[in-house]
Structure formats: C-alpha cells, structure tokens
C-alpha cells in the first residue's frame, strides 16, 4: 500500500509583523521595462544575416539609481552566439529614467527581450 506523506505543520499567524524599514529599499524588481532616455536597438550582425540566424534574446538588466545600466545577463539565449552578444552590447549602453521609492532614487532590475527578425532587420 502507498505511504501517505505526513500533513504539513500548521503555520502560526503573525499578530504584529515588524514594520518595514522605509529606507531599506536599495533595488526594485520591475514587472515591466522602465521608461528609457536612450535605448538604441542592436545592430544585426552581418554574419548572422548571411547565415539566416534569427531569435529572441531575453536579458536580465540592472541599473544604478540614476538609470544607467550596470549589468546585463542573458536569461535565455537566442541559440546564436553573435545575436546574444549584439543584444548584450546594445542594452549595456541603455539609460533609463530614474525610479523613485519613498522619494529616493533606487536601482532597478527588469527583463527585456531583443528580437532579431530578418523580415524586420
């Protein structure tokens, strides 16, 4: 006969949770892209065009409190190294409008997709 797993332990509700420190926010994760001051699209690599390479590169982007991009990581590559590198190079130059929390500028993190499509180079 199958063995039943034990029931989960009950969780005690918290009566008075500790207040969240307002000044503690140093980085905000956004559900959508922020407003951009400067976000040129990447140059489609010539070698990729010759090879008919297409794809979407999903990038994780972090900015400083002034909106300057400070880190770009490939969250999901296109399957083509040249396209991935072109996307990272372009997004590394982007500059966003600052994001404010409690009246203070904060660093942000967001995801963006760069689409390499030969019908719309």
Image (tube, rainbow, N blue to C red):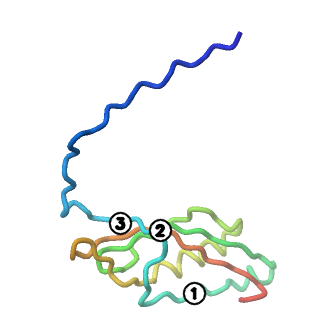
Considering only vertical position in the picture, is 13 above or below 24? Answer: above
Q: Is residue 116 left or right of residue 87?
A: right
Please tell me which residue lies in front, 15 or 41: 15
Please tell me which residue lies in front, 112 or 103: 103
Please tell me which residue lies in front, 101 or 44: 101
- C-alpha span from label 1 to label 2: 21 Å
Question: What residue did someone put label 2 on?
Answer: 31
Residue found 50% across the figure and 21% down from its top: 7
Q: Are marks 3 and 2 in contact (CB under 8 Å)?
A: no
Q: Quadrant of the C terminus?
A: bottom right
Q: Is residue 88 left or right of residue 53?
A: left
Question: What residue did someone put label 3 on?
Answer: 28
Q: Is residue 65 left or right of residue 113?
A: left
- Whichever of callouts 1 and 3 sits on the residue coming sooner in the sequence is 3
Considering only vertical position in the picture, is 118 above or below 32? Answer: below
Residue found 74% across the figure and 79% down from its top: 48
Give residue 102's mark: none
Q: Position of residue 83 (x, y in %)?
A: 66, 75
Question: What residue did someone put label 1 on?
Answer: 41
Where is residue 56, by image quadrant?
Answer: bottom right
Circle 3 sits in a helix, a strand or a loop, which is it? strand
Please tell me which residue lies in front, 100 or 66: 100
Circle 2 sits in a helix, a strand or a loop, which is it? loop
Circle 1 sits in a helix, a strand or a loop, which is it? loop
Residue found 60% across the figure and 78% down from its top: 86
Q: Quadrant of the N terminus?
A: top right
- C-alpha span from label 3 to label 2: 10 Å
């Amino acid at each position: 006969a199958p063995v039943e797993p034990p029931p989960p332990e009950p969780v005690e509700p918290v009566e008075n949770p500790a207040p969240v420190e307002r000044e503690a926010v140093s980085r905000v994760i956004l559900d959508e892209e922020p407003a951009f001051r400067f976000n040129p699209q990447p140059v489609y690599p010539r070698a990729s065009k010759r090879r008919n390479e297409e794809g979407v590169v999903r990038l994780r982007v972090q900015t400083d409190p002034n909106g300057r991009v400070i880190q770009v990581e490939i969250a999901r590559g296109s399957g083509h190294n040249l396209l991935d590198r072109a996307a990272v190079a372009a997004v590394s130059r982007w500059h966003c409008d600052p994001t404010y929390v409690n009246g203070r500028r904060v660093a942000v993190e967001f995801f963006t997709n760069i689409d390499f499509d030969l019908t719309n180079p």
